[in-house]
Image (cartoon, rainbow, N blue to C red):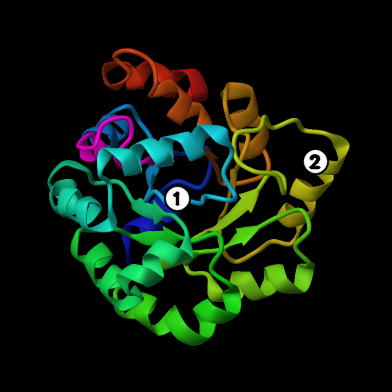
Amino acid sequence: MNRLNSMFNQKKNNLLSVYFTAGYPDLNATVDVAEALEKAGVDFLEIGFPYSDPVADGPTIQNSSQQALDNGMTLNVLFEQLAELRKRVSIPVLLMGYANPMVQYGVERFCAKAAEVGVDGVIVPDLPMYEYETLYKECFAKHGLSNIFLVTPQTAEDRIRKIDGLSNSFIYLLSSASITGGSLTLSDVTETYFKRIKDMELNNPVVIGFGISNKAAFDKATAYANGAIVGSAFVKFQAEEGYLERIPEFVKSIRN
């Protein structure tokens, strides 16, 4: 059983994940940030590998990706940094990014390196389900990596059932169909959407992302799902002076 499945077996609710961009704001901070987040009580992590055209991301994560690239972050550099990950971090870790850099690197090589450094899964928002199923599923399985699918308010029920059947850890439920960096407002429409997914009683746990920026949003999301993901709010926080030492303060503001 991998780290993700063990986590969901041990803790069913109020799971907190944090996303951050590898190489931002400093090239060599990646594992330091991961370690600090674990010590602060985060349940699992998403490390973004930057890309020059992050179409699903808002300005905050776009800017962090560009700065990381300017700092010299590449997949080669990231995997070199993550070589020491499992000496310092024990919680589940996912890589999140776009298909283009993964394909350019070589999917087989990418999966092998990810497994070698202790990564548990991958989130690739623009990887078509058909391509994953026909081209890459066996490669992911061979290296023990979970592929995390995204569901939006527009995703049809039959497709959600298909995603549930292909998943083996959790499903990433987008709070809206917009880009990252917005704020979660629990309108009647959003609440109906969350309730619809909850009432489907899917086989896999569900984690909500996009717009989780404070305790109120975290509490709203976890009323309908097993956990929630904080992204842009943390990346904004990283721009502040002394952010690394203040990570416990940030996590406390979300969870307590």
Position of 48 relative to 63 (above/below)? below
Q: Which residue is mark 2?
A: 191
User: Is residue 100 rendered magenta in the image?
Assistant: no
Between 166 and 150, the one lying in front of the other is 150
User: What residue is shown at x 44% (from left), y 30% (from top)?
Assistant: 235
In the image, 162 versus 219, the foreground residue is 162
Q: Amino acid at mark 2?
A: Glu
Name the spot of residue 9 as percent of width and height, x first: 43, 55
Residue 248 occupies quadrant: top left
Judged left or right of residue 160, residue 50 is left
Residue 52's disc is 1
- Residue extending farthest top: 241
Badge 2 local density, few (<14 within 10 Å), some, or many (20+)?
Answer: some
Does residue 28 belong to the magenta stretch? yes
Question: Mostly what secondary structure, the magenta segment?
Answer: loop
Tell me the SS state at disc 1: loop
For the residue marked with disc 1, what is the amino acid? Ser
Q: Which x, y percent locates residue 76?
A: 22, 58
Q: Tell whether 113 sits left or right of 95.
A: left
Quadrant in which residue 237 is drawn: top left
Q: Please report the bounds of the magenta region as a residue range.
A: 19-31
For the N terminus, the quadrant is bottom left
Q: How far from the left and from the top, in percent, is residue 92?
A: 33, 51
